[in-house]
Image: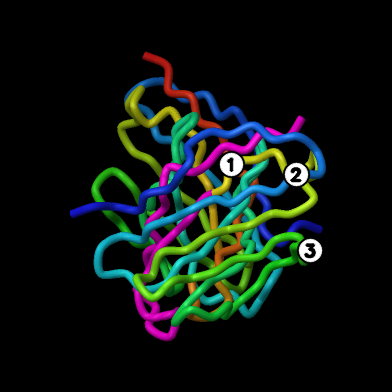
Amino acid sequence: DAGVTQSPTHLIKTRGQQVTLRCSPKSGHDTVSWYQQALGQGPQFIFQYYEEEERQRGNFPDRFSGHQFPNYSSELNVNALLLGDSALYLCASSLGGGFVDTGELFFGEGSRLTVL
Amino acid sequence: QKEVEQNSGPLSVPEGAIASLNCTYSDRGSQSFFWYRQYSGKSPELIMFIYSNGDKEDGRFTAQLNKASQYVSLLIRDSQPSDSATYLCAVERAAGNKLTFGGGTRVLVKP
């Protein structure tokens, strides 16, 4: 049973560039959430996708956008990269769009983004 | 005031002892509470969750919740070197899996 998979695992970008990160949820899951984890801090919620729509959003600027595909996979896009965007980006999958609280969020191993 | 606060540590614990981790939260509307373990360079993994006031035990782990005091704790009994990690407390206001995390407590278990 495949867990949550993310790609790429590591990437380096320069300020002003754009980046796309990808996530495939755990088999059977239909909801994808994205979190940003800066070094030494806890993850911060970016947004959540369910039924191909953004359902919830955290306190992140519009430079952060996403998409969910019919197969439930998801992309996170960040435009006009800043040095402060350097972080581990975590994808988490769950079931039911949050309407059913399963009590568990499955995290992928993350994509580590370095902005120079 | 941060929404979820944890002592960053490190909390140094001898092998075999009990590690006690604390977490406070500011949103009285929080309904669900989670403890995650995160090894260095890895993603968070769920240890346990608790919804109701009181204690919940799972193996060597016990979560304790006091909603009136807005306080949740995690006890790790018979600590092992493999328990050395950062422990993240997370809260959820309502079903939806939007979690608010604390900064984590780093635990070091010394043989």
User: Which type of secondary structure does the marked residue at label 3 adopt?
Assistant: loop
Closer to the camera in the image, B66 or B59? B59
Asked whether, in this view, residue B81 is left or right of residue A64, the answer is left
Q: Residue at x 38, y 52 (%)?
A: B46
Disc number at residue A17? 2
Q: Nearer the viewer, mark 3 or mark 2?
A: 2
Label 3 vs label 2: CA separation?
A: 16 Å
State the quadrant of the N terminus of chain A: bottom left
Asked whether, in this view, residue B14 is left or right of residue A89, the answer is left
Q: Residue at x 38, y 70 (%)?
A: A72
Closer to the camera in the image, B37 or B66? B37
Label 1 vs label 2: CA separation?
A: 17 Å
User: Which type of secondary structure does the marked residue at label 2 adopt?
Assistant: loop
Bounds of the magenta segment:
A90-116
Per the image, is B43 magenta?
no
* Chain for disc number 1: A
Q: Position of residue A94 (x, y in %)?
A: 38, 68
Q: How many marks?
A: 3
Q: Residue at x 57, y 47 (%)?
A: A89
Q: Position of residue B97 (x, y in %)?
A: 49, 71
Residue type of the residue flagged with mark 1: Leu
Q: Residue at x 61, y 77 (%)?
A: A56
* Lower position in the chain sequence, tag 1 or tag 2: 2
Residue type of the residue flagged with mark 2: Gln
* Chain for disc number 2: A
**Residue closest to the far bottom:** A99
Q: Which residue is mark 1?
A: A88
Disc number at residue A61? 3
